[in-house]
Image: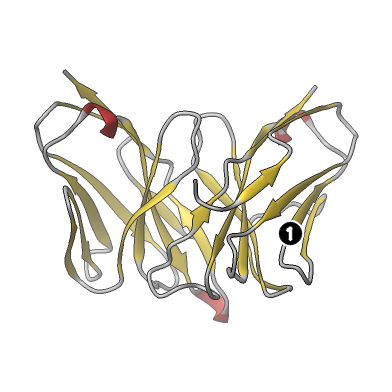
Amino acid sequence: DSGVTQTPKHLITATGQRVTLRCSPRSGDLSVYWYQQSLDQGLQFLIQYYNGEERAKGNILERFSAQQFPDLHSELNLSSLELGDSALYFCASSGVQGTENNEQFFGPGTRLTVL
Amino acid sequence: GQSLEQPSEVTAVEGAIVQINCTYQTSGFYGLSWYQQHDGGAPTFLSYNALDGLEETGRFSSFLSRSDSYGYLLLQELQMKDSASYFCAVRDGASGTYKYIFGTGTRLKVLA
């Protein structure tokens, strides 16, 4: 158990809908990262927040947005969903903004299925 | 653009040694990391190299050559539980900011 929690574990929705994925980092971790992993694909970095502020941005679609709240939990909002958005979404956390050894602790993921 | 290349699949027998290579192309470079991911599981951190040379952690070692933009993960005394996907990753520091780039992963199959 990494100490990172994600809810829900599974999410099934229809095209055009909007969903919110939630992540709670490890206790004391200030950085939260979001990744997308499609079937048999690598991890695509979406975005990083550090202590409530956006710190790094990857290939995140304009339909997607994220935020980190004062209690450090984070939410990833996906809107106007398309079939291709079906994937496993991971949240990870680390102690500081880009740790000395780049170690990130990953949550169990949320599996999103868009029908 | 930024990219990481690693073999898609490697097969080895229990007790053997296997090396998983990773070559990268980035605009900036802040170290090479390795993660393990079992089917249906979350990635877990294995190692990190910021400087050239070999880092050893138990049965796993990782090597980096920045001049060659190349690194590898060495797994010794393979066990069945090592069957998993292995990803190399870099923090690319282009343009004064950075983002994390993962390779497409190497699926390791350990045979009895």
Residue B85, quarter of the rendered image:
top left
Q: Is residue A33 left or right of residue B11?
A: right
Vertical placement of residue B10 versus B61, above or below: above
Please report the residue visible at 48 percent of the width from the left and 57 percent of the height from the top: B101
Residue A67, quarter of the rendered image:
bottom right
Secondary element under disc 1, as helix, strand or loop, is strand
Please report the residue visible at 45 percent of the width from the left and 70 percent of the height from the top: B27
- Residue at far bottom of view: B96
In percent of width and height, residue B24 lies at 35, 58
Please report the residue visible at 86 percent of the width from the left and 26 percent of the height from the top: A14
- Residue named by callout 1: A74
In percent of width and height, residue A35 lies at 60, 50
Q: Is residue A81 left or right of residue B52?
A: right
Vertical placement of residue A82 versus B90, above or below: above
Please report the residue visible at 80 percent of the width from the left and 56 percent of the height from the top: A65
In percent of width and height, residue B21 lies at 24, 47
In percent of width and height, residue A13 lies at 83, 28
Q: Nearer the viewer, residue B112 or A71?
A: A71
**Chain of the residue under label 1:** A
Q: Amino acid at mark 1?
A: Ser
Count of picture labels? 1
Q: Is residue B1 left or right of residue A81?
A: left
Which quadrant would the C terminus of chain B be assigned to in this image?
top left
